[in-house]
Every structure is written in C-alpha cells, then in structure tokens.
Image (cartoon, rainbow, N blue to C red):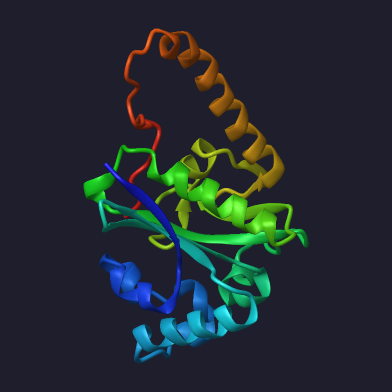
C-alpha cells in the first residue's frame, strides 16, 4: 500500500467526497454561511484567497493514487467561524485545525494520525508553535472534530466547555514524540535486520478514528 501526502490546492477540491465537498461551515462563518447559494464556489474562493495570503491550508493523503482523506488548518483570522465558539479565541501562537476526514474505506489504517503529524510539521515550519481545535463532545456537530479523536492524536484540553472545549497540540512535543517512536522501532528491528530477515513495509495504527 503506497501512501502519499500532498498539499491541499484548488485542483484537489474535486477529490473531496461527501458533505465536505461543498461545506463552508468554517470558511464563511455564521452570518455569511446562512445566505450562501453556491457553496462550492465559495469554498474555492476561500481556498484561492488563503493560498495567496498564507499558502496551502491543508494536506491530502492518497493511498495507491486514490483519495483517502484530508486535513484543513489556517490562521484564525482566515477562519471566520473560529470566533463563534464559546471557548474562542485560539492562542496567538496557534493555527486552527478546522477539519479532518478519513474516507470510510480507509478507516483503521492510522491515516488520521499521519495527517495530523503532516499538519504539525508544516505549521511548525511556518513559525507557529501549536495547533488548536474546537472539539465536539456529543458528535452532533458534523463539521466539528470529535473530542475523542483529538485526544487520541495528542491534543490536550486547554479550555473546558460542556459542548465545545478548545484543545491544543504543542507542535514540538508532537514531532518529538514521533521521533521517539520511530527511534524505538529502529531499536526493536535492529537485531532482526542483523539476521537478514525481510522487514514489512509499514504497520497500521488501530487507534485511528473514522471521520465522516
């Protein structure tokens, strides 16, 4: 199984499936979101302006050349909906993780964690210290990530709320954790490699959560 992580650009909008393809929950905010007539056009316009001002606001993961999921993030001033939550605003050193989705066909393969790590690396490279996200406790807000998913991929609650807590992922900690895990795997495999036994290409994570 070949995985490829690519920047989210305008030509990738056609890859999106389900409600994400036309959802402008985060891009327009409460007031404008109620009056939009052409959500796909609005989404493309937001993506185009964000690319020009800040660069790519996300990543897409392909498995054997096929779309398997995506993650979107941007500075808070580019995400109007981010100010509408009771636990707003996000910290000044953070970028808002707005959404992530794994296609059901690829659930259970660790792709959610892979996308979060790719986002962390990209955002840290741009000079930010953290990703922050609003989580949903009851799962009824379709465009808000479940708290359980955020906790599973390393986020920690920074401001509590009964429905929409705000969570934070320190980027240096996240990438250091990844490096420590990779080093541990190398140490475990070193004696086996010394015997010349072929190694598996990769392993799947079972702590991934399917996002619909």
Task: Examine the rendering and report whether any part of residue 165 can be seen.
Answer: no
The C terminus lies in which quarter of the figure?
Answer: bottom left
Q: Nearer the viewer, residue 169 or 9?
A: 9
137 left or right, relative to 55: left
157 left or right, relative to 27: right
Q: Residue at x 37, y 41 (%)?
A: 209
Q: Residue at x 47, y 40 (%)?
A: 148
The N terminus lies in which quarter of the figure?
Answer: top left
Image position of 24 with respect to 64: above or below:
below
**Residue most toward the left?**
105
Q: Nearer the viewer, residue 196 or 21?
A: 196
| Number of marks | 0
Q: Nearer the viewer, residue 42 or 6?
A: 6
Task: Examine the rendering and report whether any part of residue 176 can be seen.
Answer: yes
Q: Position of residue 119 (x, y in %)?
A: 55, 54
Q: Residue at x 40, y 32 (%)?
A: 207
Image position of 40 with respect to 81: above or below:
below
Q: Nearer the viewer, residue 186 or 87?
A: 186
Q: Residue at x 43, y 48 (%)?
A: 138
Q: Position of residue 102 (x, y in %)?
A: 34, 52
């Amino acid at each position: 199984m070949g995985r490829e992580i690519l920047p989210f650009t305008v030509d990738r909008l056609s890859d999106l499936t389900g409600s994400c393809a036309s959802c402008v929950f985060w891009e327009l905010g409460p007031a404008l979101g109620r009056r939009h007539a052409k959500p796909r056009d609005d989404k493309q316009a937001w993506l185009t302006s964000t690319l020009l001002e800040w660069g790519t606001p996300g990543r897409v993961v392909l498995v054997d050349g096929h779309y398997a999921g995506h993650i979107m993030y941007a500075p808070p001033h580019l995400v109007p909906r981010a100010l509408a939550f009771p636990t707003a605003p996000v910290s000044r050193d953070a970028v808002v993780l707005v959404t992530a989705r794994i296609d059901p066909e690829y659930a259970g393969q660790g792709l959610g964690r892979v996308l979060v790590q790719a986002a962390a690396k990209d955002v840290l490279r741009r000079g930010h210290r953290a990703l922050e996200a609003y989580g949903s406790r009851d799962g009824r807000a379709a465009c808000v990530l479940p708290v359980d998913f955020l906790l599973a991929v390393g986020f920690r609650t920074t401001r509590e709320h009964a429905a929409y807590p705000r969570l934070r992922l320190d980027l240096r900690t996240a990438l250091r954790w990844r490096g420590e895990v990779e080093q541990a795997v190398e140490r475990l495999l070193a004696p086996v490699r010394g015997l010349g036994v072929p190694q598996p290409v990769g392993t799947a994570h079972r702590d991934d959560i399917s996002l619909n």
